Image: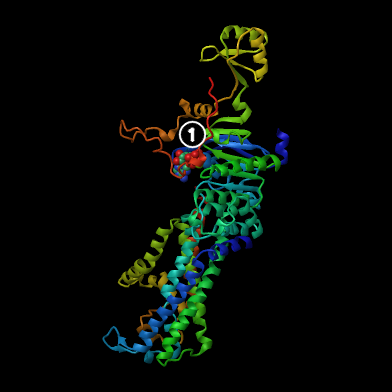
Amino acid sequence: MNSAAADGTGVSVRGLTKTFGSFRAVDDLTFEVRPGRVTGFLGPNGAGKTTTLRMLLGLIRPTAGEALIGGHHYADLQHPLQVVGAALEATGFHPGRSGRDHLRVLAATHAIPDARVDELLELVGIPAAARKRAGDYSMGMRQRLGLAAALLGDPQVLLLDEPANGLDPEGIRWMRGFMRHLAREQGKTVLVSSHLLGEVEQTVEDVVIIANGHLVREGTMDELHGDPAVLVRTTDAPTLAAALARAGIASAPEDQPGSLRVLTGDLARVGDVALAVGLPVHELRPLRTDLERLFLELTESPEHRNRNLEVTSTTPAGAAPAPTGARHTDIPPPTGADAPVPAQEENR
Amino acid sequence: MTGLVRAELLKYFTTRMSWSMPLTMFLVGAIFAAVQGLVLVLIGEFPGSGGEVIRPAELFDDLTLARMVYTGAIQMGYLLALVLGILAMGGEFRHRTITSTLLSAPRRGRLLTAKVTGLVLVVLVNGVAFVAGSLLGGGIMLAVGDAAVFPEPGQLLGTPAKMLLILVLWGLIGFGLGVLIPNQVIALFVGIGVTLLIEPLLGFGLTFVDQLKEAARYFPSQATTSVLDLFAGVDDATAQSMGSADPLTWWVGALVLLGYAAVMTLLGWVVTTRRDVS
Ligand SMILES: Nc1ncnc2c1ncn2[C@@H]1O[C@H](COP(=O)(O)OP(=O)(O)OP(=O)(O)O)[C@@H](O)[C@H]1O
Ligand SMILES: [Mg+2]
């Protein structure tokens, strides 16, 4: 895997820390992002994702540690737009300037021709709308314009902060396919942040999960899924478990009566074993990790309880915080379009 | 660097301000120069401090009179230039375009240099509109009042040039202010408030304190007046009777203004390089 890193431009974050006053928004964060893969950068609201990305881009000065792109600080890049493309939340557009002109301004800094601007507007699907004043844009159009801006210099590294926000289902599907295309076919490094694991699970190969500014998990999606497992339901679970054990397959009883969780990915094998001992199979299906639940467990475990939702000493006793009360406000309200993909099968 | 300057110019020329500002400059120049002409040439007399009647047309030679009329709008002009300067940086924060701007130009010193260069060019374009308006408005009044419209063109030519210089310097002062105070509304409030209200009051107050009388000459508006050098060629006594109390040499006045701009921009630069953009 390290050989791939040699070809492309990776991202590395080492001991990165940022305090705002006495508040540690990002706390000793270390992770790597590899080229040729899509990496999900996940964490609940206020976990520090945007702050980390802004430190990578030289917009926020780290209190400690470093955030490097291909071994360089962003500000040291000669032609930054040709190395890194970033679409951050809360990036503004001058309301009186057209989207196309916004891109032309950015393009001018790197002597990128207007033809490239039009090509990208075509790609992100707003060629006509881009000639209107940006003040009238919908959320989704702003998101697409931001993506076009990120792609302007055909960069090696893409840092996308919640790119699916405000996109319609069609837009989200396109976005996912596009990110995979950029990473797999073009070998680019793609880091995409989200507060929903389910939203990115079909897209990303690697994940970096943070909570309250800390790293809680880093690894591949496969590692997160864990070993494959199968659920089987029969009339006599203990007998089946014994037969499976003789065949060298481990299993454990599940909550439902008559159900076993079998540690294999091979459905046919489980069926064959049941047949051999004369037991009927009432249900047989692969078990997938409920990633959304895993994500919640990882990020909401007692030591990672969202600090932004805690009742502080200044809050009057008994006044429970509203679920979204302490959230910072630059997150647009979710729309129907970016709802998570339906939860998968249950387990455990 | 040229790319960054081009981007800054493009920013200006892709919003409505690219035509509304020069238009305003032109109209303001024309109207206020015309009013000045109306007072000095057409009405032609007003009461002096000692109760006597002052007739500017008799008091001044043609050249000075023309200068006074053509520069009649300068205060409004430099206020607009101040606004242009403030908006150059303030607009980036207000519309949160500062993020994209810094992504395309992460070295903040270079960005500021490009912005200053772009601003000087933009103020010059606006300044030309302003001077054209002033010449038109003032010229009409001079002509109607039977005064010389272009007396001694060779010497008069210095006046529009100095007007342009003043606008550029005020644009830079505004830029410094905008960099220092990222909140555009507050920056505009402070800039215009200080120029129109606080500075004149303070200057007036200082005239009562002997040791500080001199200091008022270095205030922005008084330094600006000395840059215009309206009374060049007029004997000192007459100039002083017109309230021009011992002004600075014109280029000293220009350096004073440049000093204000430089100090604020440098302070702003120091703040900018360390400021978090989130
Ligand atoms: N400039 C700032 N000053 C003070 N606190 C800040 C600042 N920027 C961010 N924070 C705080 O740092 C924490 C992390 O914020 P950040 O925006 O990085 O979270 P996030 O992971 O991007 O969340 P979301 O999913 O809601 O976008 C939040 O609690 C936020 O309130
Ligand atoms: Mg965020």
Q: Looking at the image, which residue is at 59% across and 61% down?
A: B7
Q: Looking at the image, which residue is at 42% across and 60% down?
A: B187
- Count of numbered marks: 1
Which corner quadrant holds the N terminus of chain B? bottom right
Rendered location of residue A340, percent (x, y): 52, 35
Q: Identify which residue, A137 or B48, lies in the foreground.
A: A137
Q: Looking at the image, which residue is at 50% across and 85% down?
A: B156
Rendered location of residue B245, percent (x, y): 38, 79
Rendered location of residue B181, percent (x, y): 44, 57
Q: In this view, does A119 lie above or below B223?
A: above
Q: Identify which residue, A243 or A117, lies in the foreground.
A: A243
- What amino acid does circle 1 point to? Asn
Q: Mark 1 points at which residue?
A: A212
Disc 1, SS: loop
Output the chain of dot 1: A
Q: Mark 1, residues whose alpha carbon is within 10 Å: few (<14), some, or many (≥20)?
A: many
Scheme of image coloration: rainbow
- Name which quarter of the figure residue A215 lies in: top right
Q: Identify which residue, B42 or A151, lies in the foreground.
A: A151
Let me know if residue A156 appears in the view. yes
- Name which quarter of the figure residue A111 lies in: bottom right
Let me know if residue B237 appears in the view. no
Rendered location of residue B167, percent (x, y): 48, 72
Mark 1 within 8 Å of ligand 1, using the beta carbon: no
